[in-house]
Image (cartoon, coloured by chain):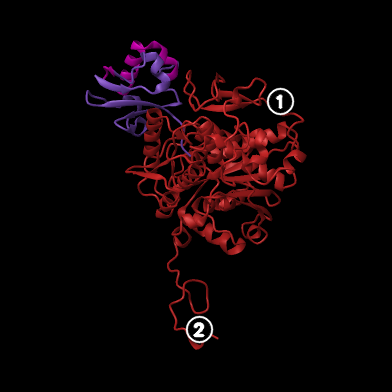
Amino acid sequence: MSTVRIPPTLRPATNGAKTVDVAGATVGEVLVALVAAHPSIEASVLGADGSLNRFVNVFVNGTDVRHLEELATPVGPADTVLLLPAMAGG
Amino acid sequence: MTTELLTTPGTDAAPGGRIRGLRCRNCARQERLGPSYVCAACFGPLEVDYDYDALDGVLTRERIEARRPGIWRYLELLPAEEQPLRGLAVGSTPLVDATRLGPEIGIERLWLKDDTRNPTLSFKDRAVAIAAARAAEWKLPALACASTGNLAGATAAAAAAIGLPAYVVIPADLEPAKVDHALAYGASVIPVTGTYDDVNRLCLEIADETGWGFVNVNLRPFYAEGSKTLAFEVAEDLGWRLPDVIVAPIASGALYTKLAKGIGELVRLGLVEPKSVRFVGGQAAGCAPVATAYAAGVDEIAPVRVPDTIVRSLAIGSPADGRYALEQARASGGSIEAVSDLDAAEAIRRVAATEGIHPETAGGVTLAAAAQARAAGVIGPDDEVVVLLTGNGLKTPDASSFGLATRRAERGGPGLADPIAPDLDAFLSWLGA
């Protein structure tokens, strides 16, 4: 189980939980399992084709998965997956 | 706290007001006005939603011209109900007719928007002024930012002026002059061992945790609108007309895209005649995710993990508005140029030596980008071009000599002379007279 940290915008879908433990060997599997457990997250996180919403950035232990193996990035029980809006800055 | 110094908290929800609320740029979902920045439905960016119909016939050239200098002369097009009573004197910076510099880069009709002169010496004062007004109105406990440098001083100074504590989070390798600048206003400055994008990620989490007013996170819809005032001032100073080309730096892409939005508003309200303006963007080659996508003809922007450039003020590897900037460059017939550090440094020296304006590295990038776009034919010989100089060279003192083998003056020439005795003969000897 990896720990997924949920941003405030998505917490209504997790009954307010800031973190959710989710099974999966890759970031993609973790997100699919997250959506299965909390279906109202789906539209915010994954597109119709299963790709990542371009307005969401996913980090594993602080590193953007686009610098790793994207949705195929492996994750283990000690890893933290963080979802954040792909914005701010400048 | 000095929030009572500011006017009319709470009136922004008034029915029929020109500010209707926030709206998602991606899916157009409406949200209530408040310190929020992300659409609850699709995660898209929120923008301020104005009722332009309510401004028809209200905001006229005469009305603007009758007001005092500064960004608040365009109040109706800014997301604050009223001009705050407390705040820095921001905006109305000079538009300089660059008759010495222009011919050197093949642009005869060249204007420089000299935003090196704002209160904290960069255009960021424009954006922070709006965010600070909202932070005070909403009684947020602190003003904060994730900064590549210029925003640090701007946030710290604005917070001081309205009596809020300031928290400035920066990459640990930032130029010392920018760190000292923020410290001077009494800010808490927190260096982070990482890139700007690491800083930004951290600040998204801090903003959620603390409820502080992060000017470029949860106040970003308001903050970003401040950059429109650059476009408003350019149009007004040109006698209420638009140039053929505007050249701007691209870091997050917010400034670049807000220029187009501002021009669209001027046209919508009949303040200028419609005209197709080309937008040329400049990025540092050592951190050019948007320019790279532009050159490759693709829509996806691959983030830069570790920027490698002296142009730290533009060193954002994952630009929030990069995709919108890309669309704007293509749709307007402009371009996005990647500029080497050496070319940026040479451009700084050139504008300083020909026009007496000393910009920081981002200004070197925009000027070099203009020259590149001219060489590539994006800018024609007869085009009227406005180049934005968004920050002051005093913040990046090492950049002006970057790439020079020596700053040492040859006998009688420019540069730093060797010390001489306090003696007229010694001076005349150095001069070669």
Q: Which residues are magenta?
A: A21-44
Amino acid identity at mark 2? Phe
What secondary structure predominates along the stretch shown in magenta?
A: helix
Chain for numbered disc 1:
B
Tell me, yes or no, whether the highlighted magenta stretch contains residue A33: yes
Chain B colour as displayed: red
Residue drawn at (48%, 86%) of the image? B423
Secondary structure of the residue carrying numbered label 2: helix
Q: Residues within 10 Å of mark 1 (few under 14, many from 20)?
A: some
Side (left or right) of B363 relative to B275 = left
Name the element at disc 1. helix
Q: Who is closer to the viewer here, B343 or B160?
A: B160
Q: Name the outermost residue toward the bottom.
A: B425
**Along the line of sight, the residue nearer the viewer: B403 or B43:** B43
Q: Position of residue B247 (x, y in %)?
A: 60, 46
At 35% from the left and 28% from the top, the residue drawn is A70
Does residue B172 sit above or below B401 in this rendering? above
Instruction: Say which amino acid is labelled 1.
Output: Ala
Residue B302 drawn above or below residue B115: above
- For chain A, the rendered hue is purple
Disc 2 is attached to a residue of which chain? B
Bin the neighbour count of mark 2 within 10 Å (Cα to Cα): few under 14, some 14-19, many 20 and up: some
Q: Position of residue B154 (x, y in %)?
A: 50, 45
Q: Is B386 in the magenta?
A: no
Q: Is residue B146 visible in the rendered structure shown here?
A: yes
- Residue tagged by mark 2? B427
How many numbered marks, from 0 up? Answer: 2
Give whichever of A45, A16 is nearer the camera.
A16
Report, in whole angstroms, how far the alpha carbon at label 2 lies from the one at label 1.
Answer: 68 Å
